[in-house]
Image (spheres, rainbow, N blue to C red):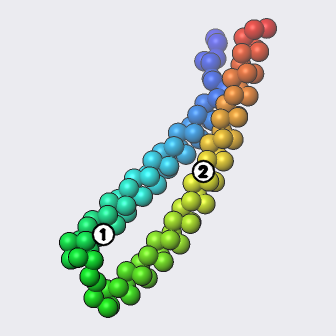
């Protein structure tokens, strides 16, 4: 009775798929926010750029919130890039190890 072959890079591929799925979800969220902000800007342009006082204060507060959120998301993206880089290095190492085993 022989055991089925188990690829040594399966765990790394699963990790990579999880990270990529997470990144895709993050990008979709960013896209939704951008589209909403663009529609708000178009609405303001339609009013000749005139914004009543209270709305101006709310928009400034919203802008600060979005800038803070952007900084947080940028940091998260950088961490995700680092994780993907590490996974790529692990996959390359595993592929080299498999190639060496096959060659011997």
Element type at marker 2? helix
Point 20% across, 72% down: residue: 46
Q: Work out whether residue 69 or residue 22 is closer to the camera in this orientation and state it.
A: 69
Q: Earlier in the sequence, mark 2 or mark 1?
A: 1
Q: Work out whether residue 4 or residue 35 is closer to the camera in this orientation and state it.
A: 35
Nearest to the eye among marks 2 and 1: give it: 1
Element type at marker 1? helix
Point 26% across, 67% down: residue: 42
Residue, disc 2: 80
Quadrant hosting residue 2: top right
Quarter of the image that includes the N terminus: top right
Residue, disc 1: 41
Quadrant hosting residue 34: bottom left
**How many C-alpha atoms fall within 10 Å of the one at disc 1: few (<14), some, or many (≥20)?**
few
Task: List x then y, in percent, for residue 84.
Answer: 62, 42
Spatial separation of the CA atoms under disc 2 and disc 1: 31 Å
Task: List x then y, in percent, for residue 21.
Answer: 48, 45
Task: List x then y, in percent, for residue 30.
Answer: 42, 58
Quarter of the image that includes the C terminus: top right
Residue 36 in sight here: no
Q: Work out whether residue 32 or residue 54 is closer to the camera in this orientation and state it.
A: 54
Point 43% across, 82% down: residue: 61
Q: Is residue 50 above or below residue 3?
A: below
Q: Work out whether residue 53 or residue 61 is closer to the camera in this orientation and state it.
A: 53
Seen from this angle, which residue lies furthest front?
A: 48
Residue 24 in sight here: yes
> Relative to 49, is 20 on the left or the right?
right
Seen from this angle, which residue lies furthest bottom?
A: 53
Point 72% across, 11% down: residue: 102
Q: Is residue 29 above or below residue 90?
A: below
């Amino acid at each position: 009775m022989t055991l089925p072959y188990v690829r040594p890079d399966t765990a790394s591929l699963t990790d990579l798929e999880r990270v990529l799925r997470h990144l895709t979800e993050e990008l979709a969220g960013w896209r939704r926010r951008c589209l909403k902000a663009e529609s708000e800007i178009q609405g303001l342009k339609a009013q000749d750029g005139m914004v009543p006082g209270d709305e101006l204060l709310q928009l400034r507060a919203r802008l600060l919130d979005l800038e803070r959120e952007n900084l947080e998301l940028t940091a998260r993206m950088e961490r995700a890039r680092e994780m993907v880089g590490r996974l790529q290095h692990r996959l390359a190492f595993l592929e080299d190890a498999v190639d060496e085993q096959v060659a011997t």
